[in-house]
Amino acid sequence: MGCPWPFLVKLDSTLDKPADLTVKPPVAAKSFAQALSDEVFGESVLVNFLSKVVMGKFVRVKISRAAYEAGLPACQTHLHGWLTLHKGDASLTTQALKVKLSNQWPHLQNWSLIPLGKGFFEFNFSSIGEMQKIWSLGMVNLKPGLMRFYCWSKDFAPQAQTQTHTQIWVRFMNLPQEYWEKQTLFEIASGLGTPLSIDDSTQNRRFGIFARVLIDVDLSENLFESVVVEREDHALSISIQYEKHPTFCAHCKMIGHTLQTCSKLNAHNTSKAPTQKSHTEFTRPDVLGKKAVSGSSNQIEKRVKFFNADIHKKNLDTTIELKGRSLTCFKG
């Protein structure tokens, strides 16, 4: 009986089929790389890999710019965080840290964090708005421990970090009311750093002495005293006041101390300072002879007595050098 479905004919073993006497060439076995490229990457990707350059103990490779930039949009909602613990505080696991933060952020639903090492973490939020809200906090007290938030940056390496950014409330003094729209305030603040939020009094215009904006500022750069706001046909200079901000050392690029109290700079200056040798000298203009004395203090003392006796006999003046000190002995 023949198979009623044409597409099943090839599966019907009861049908008589003519024998295939064609001799087929042997199929070459695929290498591991070929099999991997077929199943995971696609052959075209591996074929387009650029050649590597061996440089001693290192190897240099070049990646696709398009592929790298394709991963950047997903990081727009990311933040970097730095966990600091006081001496004696128990360490926190990543899960315990998330529980602590979840208790403080009950309104946030979809967010995650991953450890990067050296106390740094990367946070991922569901929207740019939620990311900016957490960023504007600046710091969270975990009791124990503090979590500081920083702007996400490319090529982040925890072992090379020296934090120079902080959040500062900035006052735009005597700013005319037509400039108090949120977008305009953020555009003005962008000249000083990254604007994060405006305070409630500024939002509701409760007084007009100054507008107050929270800005993420890089302390390693200049803190400008004024900003010139331009329109198509007008320019306006606005005075700036910075509210309390942390101390910063311009030498080691770190927050927490000043240049005057920098231990690294003071230690460097101390090591470079020239050693001052003590110099005791008894002089007389008519020095006629000079002898060198070296050895222990007892030996030096004996030799000085000997030279003094010799000086009295010969009626000569002598300068005796004691390894950095000079004594001129003369007849009394």
Image: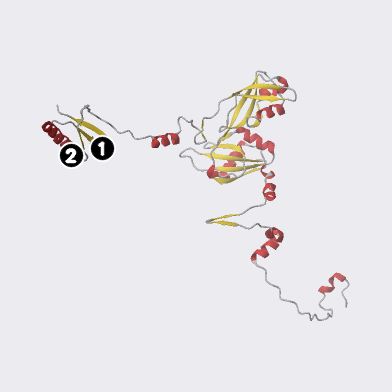
Indicate which disc residue 323 carries: 1
The residue identified by callout 2 is 299
Q: Residue 136 location, x and y as percent? A: 63, 33
The amino acid marked with disc number 1 is Lys
Quadrant assignment for the C terminus: top left
Q: Badge 1 local density, few (<14 within 10 Å), some, or many (20+)?
A: few
Residue sitting at x 41%, y 34%: 269
Quadrant holding the N terminus: bottom right
- Residue 198: give x, y in percent of width and height: 66, 27
For residue 294, what is the image quadrant?
Answer: top left
The quarter holding residue 113 reads: top right
Q: Nearer the viewer, residue 177 or 125?
A: 177
| 249 on left or right of 273 | right
Identify the mark at residue 88; answer none if there is no mark.
none
Residue appearing at x 68%, y 59% in the figure = 46
Q: Using a 10 Å C-alpha cutoff, classify the residue at mark 2 as few (fewer than 14 neighbours), some (14 to 19) or many (20 or more).
A: few
Q: How is the image coloured?
A: secondary structure
Q: 51 and 263: which one is in front?
A: 51
**For residue 297, above or below residue 46:** above
The image position of residue 191, as x and y in percent, is 65, 30
